Every structure is written in structure tokens, then in C-alpha cells.
Image (cartoon, helix red, strand yellow):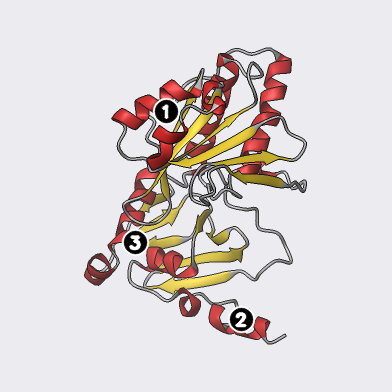
Amino acid sequence: MNAINNATPFSLRIFVADGDPDGLRLVERSNWIGKAVMFPRAVFPQVRKRKEFEETGVYLLLAPQESGEGEQLYIGEGDPIRPRIEQHYAKKDFWTKAVFFVAGQGLLNKAHVQYLESQLIKLAADAKRVPLDNATAPSAPTLSEADVADMEVFLGNILGMLPVLGVHAFEQSPTIKKGGNPQLHCRGKGIAATARDTAQGFVVQSGSFAAKDHTPSLKQYSPTVCDLRAQLLKSGVLGDAGDRLRFTQDYTFSSPSLAAAVVLGRQSNGRTEWEDANGKTLKALQEAESEK
């Protein structure tokens, strides 16, 4: 199940507990027993005594990637949460913020959150949006049929909330629908890629090709793009195809320029590199749309 695709409308209530928009935030979803708790690492010593940290839950530790594109992630569970976060505060250096999900004292047990942890790790690994700091992928515990159903609903609510909270690690590239934005093409020497601009980001489609190597100037002036290409190769999003690289799945980029730079292996302006079937650039298409 990938409940993140559930399109049912919902509302969130965000309580800024300490008055600092970047500090501790408690997030509740309409018609749901669960709660998200978000906080930067720096405030953990001040907030660790709150009752939410004494509850059983599943948590994410996040930090910007060194490449500057997206985040890196660690997923865990705690029964209760506080000792696990304390351990990571002392021993795990990479993370800068955390978010965890609880449901009130006694409503989740150890097996429940182990199930949630295993499913979230699997979804993040399948999406390949961010590198995982988890060394292993734990198996899901044995739950009753009723408990599995309950945890799938809980998981679906988590997955629906996370993108609103700025966490996109579990999102698969959106399904391209007919009648949406036009298919775009980017071509270079011996390579061609197709993509569509979507609400979730700029999606380069499976089967597209990318340059085997990048130019020296890309490494010099845009090293983060080279780091991203290396990451996509390591995760299997890009595969070796002889004298080219090939996208093995749809992949969502944060911008058309980043997508074009990865495809072409050089610095690129995505608004002019991507064109529709009639040769109109993305820039021209967007300008025409804005004039309607």
C-alpha cells in the first residue's frame, strides 16, 4: 500500500508551542487520533520533558544533504520515544531536525511502531528520493489482521501529512495523467529525455537517457549536480547503458534546470533546454500561459 496517493481533503492544526515558528511544533490532523511533533535538534534539551516524548511512536531524523539537493534520513521507533532521541542526540551527528508521530498514551505498542518503521523504511527505499542512514531494513512484526488494518490507516495519515510538513522522502513520482502539462524533450549528443512539469516537481520519465559523463565545468561550478548524478547512480535511478546512462524509473527533480543538468551532464537552463513536440521551449510555454 502507498497511501500517500490518497486524495481525500484534510486539514492540519499546527500549534507553535514555544512561540518560535522554527521551534517546537505540534501538528494534528482532522479526524485522526495521531499527532506529529516537529523540532530542531538545538531545542531538544528544552523540550525533551514534554509528555509526547514519553509516548510510543515512530520518528524521522533529517538533515540537508551535502549536495544541497534534498535531505538525508534516518527512520526509527521508540517505546517510548525520548530515550531513542536522547541516544541519537548524543551519538548521531548528521541530523538537524526531527519529526515523530504518536497517538496518546497506550494507543500504540512496540509491535505497532515496529510495523510503521519497517513500512516507512521500505517506502523510502523504493522512492529513492533521499539517502537512508539506516544500516538495515527490519522485517515487519507479526500483527493481527485488525492491527495491520489499523496501522495501514495510521501510515496513510503519516504519509499524507509529511509532504505538507516539508518531508518528501516517501513520495513516488506522480502518475502522469492525460490532458495535463505537455510532454517535454531534452536532447544532447546521442541522448534524449522526456519529462513533464507537475505540481510535485519536474518529472523525468523512465527510459530517458542521460550523458555518461559530466563536463569539467559542471564539477567546477555546480558540484552539487555531480553529487546528485553520483547518488542517482548509486541508488539505481540511473543505470549504465553502454555509452549513456538510462533512467530506470520516473524521478522527480526540484527544478527543470536541475533535471537538464543531470541529463546533459553540463550546466543548463531548463527553461530553454526542455521543449515540447513543436520545438517551443518551456520558457515560451510558460510565458504564453501567463498571458492567457
Q: Please, what is the three-letter code of the amino acid marked with disc 3? A: Val
Please tell me whether mark 1 or mark 2 is closer to you in this view: 1
Q: Taking 110 as reference, is 51 above or below it?
A: below
Tally the numbered discs: 3
- Callout 2: SS: helix
Where residue 245 appears, x then y in whole percent? Answer: 38, 56
User: Is residue 14 shown to the viewer in this render?
Assistant: yes
- Callout 3: SS: helix
Q: Please, what is the three-letter code of the amino acid marked with disc 1? A: Ile
Q: Please, what is the three-letter code of the amino acid marked with disc 2? A: Leu
Label 1: how many Cα within 10 Å (few below 14, some 14–19, many 20+): many
Quadrant location of the N terminus? top right
Q: CA distance from mark 1 to mark 2?
A: 48 Å
Write the residue at 61% across / 84% down: 287
Q: Taking 97 as reference, is 45 above or below it?
A: above
- Mark 3, residue position: 225
User: Is residue 135 shown to the viewer in this render?
Assistant: no
Where residue 32 appears, x then y in whole percent? Answer: 73, 33
Snapshot quadrant of residue 289: bottom right
The answer to whether residue 234 is left or right of residue 56 is left
Q: Taking 211 as reference, is 100 above or below it?
A: above
Where residue 233 appears, x then y in whole percent? Answer: 36, 49
